[in-house]
Amino acid sequence: MVHVLRHGEVYNPDKVLYGRLPGYHLSELGVQMAKAAAEYLGGRDVTHVVASPLERAQQTAAPFAAAFGSEVGADERLIESANWFEGKRVSVGDGALRDPRNWWVLRNPRTPSWGEPYTQIAARMRRALLAARDAARGHEAVCVSHQLPIEILRRAMQRRRLWHDPRRRQCGLASLTTFHFAGDRLVDVSYAEPAAHLVAMSAAPSAKGA
């Protein structure tokens, strides 16, 4: 069993899409979200903890490492997807989608043309998932990643269409998307939001660049 966790809320006062930019850490509420997720898995047989190398993911993994007596590994394959809008404000009302200078970048939502191809995200995330499964074989693993890569991984593993409406993603802050294996065969995918009560308190539950 591999639990793939989205990191907690990030301190982002400028409300930019931070993507892979360094220096973006969890907010105080985000730290509490990570702890709530770790407590949710308390008593589970977790023997392997790995995270995206970005600060927010490593911070989110820390309570799991403490709870299960494990080191936090770093796996580049779990990193946030690359995005042309990184470092920019692209919230509804910011005008980014109406700016003619951005139209060429936005020409193909199915690839997508503004960032790392969905097929590429799916391939690297699948490799990370299977590596974690094998590292914890007979036990359980935790992988900390980011919203879009987790959504794409779930869709790929369930053989669903990769392109989608971002507003319909099932991947809340500090949520767990769990892949259940029987040997090497995927038999189920489940979802839980152990920090939902904290997400309800968040000023930005969708968390840009998550």
Image (cartoon, rainbow, N blue to C red):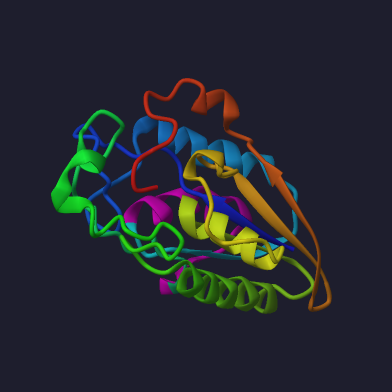
Please say if 143 is above or below 96. Answer: below
Looking at this rendering, what residue extends furthest in the top direction? 201
Q: Position of residue 201 (x, y in %)?
A: 46, 20
Q: Is residue 196 magenta?
A: no
Q: How many marks?
A: 0
Image quarter hosting the N terminus: bottom right
- Name the dominant secondary structure of the magenta segment: helix
Vertical arrangement, residue 91 with respect to residue 177, above or below:
above
Residue 91 in the image: x percent, y percent? 29, 35
Asked whether the viewer can see residue 60, the reply is yes
**Residue at horizontal 59 percent and vertical 73 percent from the top:** 126
Residue 202 screen position, x and y as percent? 42, 25
157 or 144: nearer the eye?
A: 157
Q: Is residue 209 left or right of residue 158?
A: left
Please tell me in which quadrant of the rendered image residue 162 appears.
bottom right
Q: Position of residue 52 (x, y in %)?
A: 42, 63
Magenta residues? Answer: 55-76
**Observer-nearest residue: 140 or 112?**
112
Do we see residue 146 in this rendering? no
- Residue at x-position 59% and y-position 59%: 69
Q: Is residue 48 above or below residue 12?
A: below
Inspect the magenta stretch and tell me whether residue 75 lies in it. yes
Q: Residue at x 55, y 44 (%)?
A: 169
Residue depicted at 56% across the width and 54% down the height: 151
Q: Is residue 23 left or right of residue 78?
A: left
Q: Front-most of 180 and 31?
A: 180
